[in-house]
Image (spheres, rainbow, N blue to C red):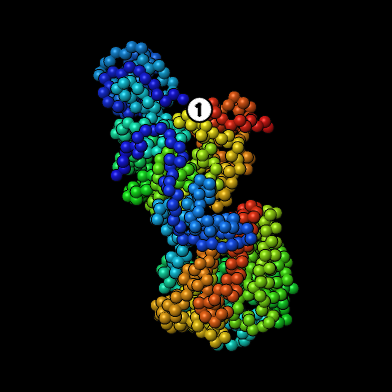
Amino acid sequence: MIDAKPDRKSRKFREIDQFDLNEKSQYYLLPFRFHRITDEKEIIVNEVGDYLTLSNGTFERIVKRQLDKEKDAELYGDLIANFFISEEPIPPLIDVLATRYRTKKLFLNYFTGLHIFVISLRCEHTCHYCQVSRVTQNRDLYDMSIANIDKGIEIMFKSPNPHVTMEFQGGEALLAFDNIKYAVEKAERIADEVGKGLTKVICTNLALINEEILEYCKEHEILISTSLDGPKYVHDKNRHKPHASSYELAIKGIELSRKILGHDRVSALMTTTKLSLAYPVEIIDEYFNLGFQGIFLRNISPYGFALRTDKSKYETEKFLTFYKKALDRILEYNFSGHYFTEDLAKIFLTKILTPFNVGFVDLQSPAGLINGVVVFNYDGGVYATDESRMLAEQKDYTFKLGTLDDSYNDLFFGKKAQEIAQLWANEALTGCSECAFQQYCGADPVHNHATQGDMYGFRPNSDFCQKNMEIIRYLIVLMESDNRIKKIFESWAKTATH
Amino acid sequence: MLLRTKGKPINIETHLVGKVTRNPDQLDENSFLLIDSSISELPSKNYMGVLSRQDEYEVKNGEYVVFKIPTLDHLTDGDIVSVGNDGNINTLYRVNSFHNTLLATERCNSNCLMCSQPPRDKNDIPIHYQIHKKLIPLIPKDCFELGISGGEPTLMGDLFFDLLSQIKTELPATEIHVLTNGRSFAWNQMAEKLGELDYRRLMLGIPLYADYYQVHDYIVQAENAFYQTILGLHNLARYNQRLEVRIVLHKQSIPRLTRLAKYIYKNLPFVEHVTFMGLEYIGYTPHNIQKLWIDPYDYHDELGEAVEFLAGQGMHVSIYNTPLCVLPERLWKFARKSISDWKNDYLPECSRCSKLNDCGGLFTWNLKKHSEHIRPFTA
């Protein structure tokens, strides 16, 4: 099996040029894509997300086979080592590349993990941008019935995923806390029986939180996810609650939740409204001062009631300006020795800087809808994503997979799922298939449908594309121009993977 | 440190392997009695033989003997030696050391510019294997760690797996560290076979010197070595083997060192340990010193960036064979006292150093060629 004889005639040392496996200097291109990132620099990205930044014109020299192995020795070595070119039609390490590719698509391994239960559509807030909620006492019409909870749990445990997450959303989920308790206890029993992991999350504005609820959450290891849009003057304007300050309630709720559950068991999400755009620094400071380790700068989603008011309409350009200002502020905190992340950047950086990936519904390909997430609506409807059920509130049922009375196969592999699956991989979408940032981005048929009228979408004027491409470009330019920022970004990417 | 000695053999026909003791009560069929000066009477029990410093020796019962040995001072009760028919006594295992290594073979399919133990092309595999087969059952069961090195141990072929499986059976509590260039594992069935041993205490230390094949192949003086090693690492990872990547620091490996660190993180994130190792001034190195020498002080930046990048990404990283005074202080936490006791030394000025106890010092042979920046810390 192993040739025990030495593979040489003598042990005389040879010079480095004698170890060139390709003296003719012919090379083959492996799949990679390119993009101009500044006036001086271009980027090339390979099939597994490794990138090189190059001075303008280099890409052209590479593809025109104009590289000189000796004069461009360093670049030539970089291109070979990083799977951009090969000296043989099939690169010697193609199996390594294949493993890397599988690693990048590992999020597909287990199928649906996140199961959202819209436990009630009722809410005691009247947020101007709210996409779905109703202020009403009518439980029969707007709370999820026990029968539907049972069916939802049954379907959840049919997922092949060894670890499922059950997330309660609203409306205000705590208005139906008794039903949450019922669902949690039933799901725990089944998880034990079938030997699956189970994570439980309640999304709440915290207005109704109290010690009794939190003690229950502690006992059942339930995570709390809340909304915080920034300082009081931003939050209270965004999130209107009649006769009360939503901000005060949220802050009190965060403190109490941390006290009872532990600091890291409570997370907060912010939504950027038109008003928020004027306060990037203040919003970051608010999160930092409250002891959060990061913030997810989310632009408002173009669904439901959100687009109905002029107040919430703003252009992506303005969001990007806001985003960059906020990121600057975050970097200032990091420069002075604090660990504080921006979580959208963290997702991108994990894809850009590590061999791993993170599943995130619209930043993965194939997309996370059905593959990673499914929504059980209060009325028994089953939807592909959270946004899909918001479209349904406008009577648009495009992404309704069926109802809880349908079979698992019909819901997850049925006609609707098949239809969406045609368009959920950016590798196969015009405008994405040749994009340098394809590996860092994702596909979002729901967003395309909601904003452009069809699932396929049209990249040249897509706000999704405009936003993601610019943020990715900006992150790369930042770290390529400042080594301190690169170190900070590397530290963010690391924690996203472990 | 003395590891071999020689005397006059009597009655010895083949290689004998046994423990040594000065205490007649401890003697058994697997041990030699050490005689430093004359004794009146030999014990009347069954034992392997006698190793004596006496100038004269009178055989009584046909026992195996080596006499007229210049010194036995280096041997401690419990040490294990091999005794040849030529009177050579080689120390195989030292009971008071954490650095015991089995030499699998002196053959190698690479020929690294800085090899510390240059390979020889003679077929020594059967003889080493026979000796190790006798040695392994004698090693104390509480042996903490045992190394296997070469040459290239995997050139043993099937015997490599036999050796490992014997160790696994005889020394179930011992950590095994094999130094291999990993090239043999480019053939998946080799990795698969190792996987079948299901040996969780086994760790393979595999050298990698660049992210670009031509530089690595040049350093190890073997075509296709880089591709074979990388495929080998991947095949081994497929069978859940524990892996360590070893990088020797010198003029040929430094220019692409930070790229190599990125390459390891991107392509080999499964390795358990990455070690950056100072150059040993022995073996081929003195001959190739013009091609290899760079003062460790002059590669601070590259080493620091590589080490901190990998550690920052959550990988376990160590710096070997480098005195603290030539490392920036921020890298001290990665420095290990890595040099085996028998080849570890310090410069005269080191005796004044307040960090002496924390410092790994130098290879004995590096006393002749060391950084220009070695300075004692004075508290």
* Residue A380 seen in the figure: yes
Relative depth, front residue between B181 and B127? B181
* Residue A256 seen in the figure: no
* Left or right of A203, for residue A198: left
* Left or right of B46, for residue B140: right
Relative depth, front residue between A106 and A38? A38
Q: Is residue A44 above or below residue A450?
A: above
Residue under the image location 27 percent in, 26 percent down: B14
Name the outermost residue toward the top.
B56
Residue under the image location 65 percent in, 54 percent down: A482
Relative depth, front residue between A341 and A450? A450
Residue B218 position, x and y percent, is 45, 40
Residue under the image location 49 percent in, 58 percent down: A63
Residue under the image location 41 percent in, 73 percent down: A158
* Left or right of A167, for residue B228: left
* Left or right of A125, for residue A156: left
Name the outermost residue toward the right.
A233
The subunit carrying tag 1 is B
Which quarter of the figure is the C terminus of chain B placed in?
A: top right
Q: Secondary structure at mark 1?
A: helix
Residue B102 position, x and y percent, is 38, 34
Residue A77 position, x and y percent, is 50, 49
Question: Which residue is the site of mark 1?
Answer: B365
Q: Is residue A476 above or below residue A13?
A: below
Residue B327, by quadrant, is top right
Q: Is residue B98 above or below residue A141?
A: above
Residue A3 position, x and y percent, is 31, 41
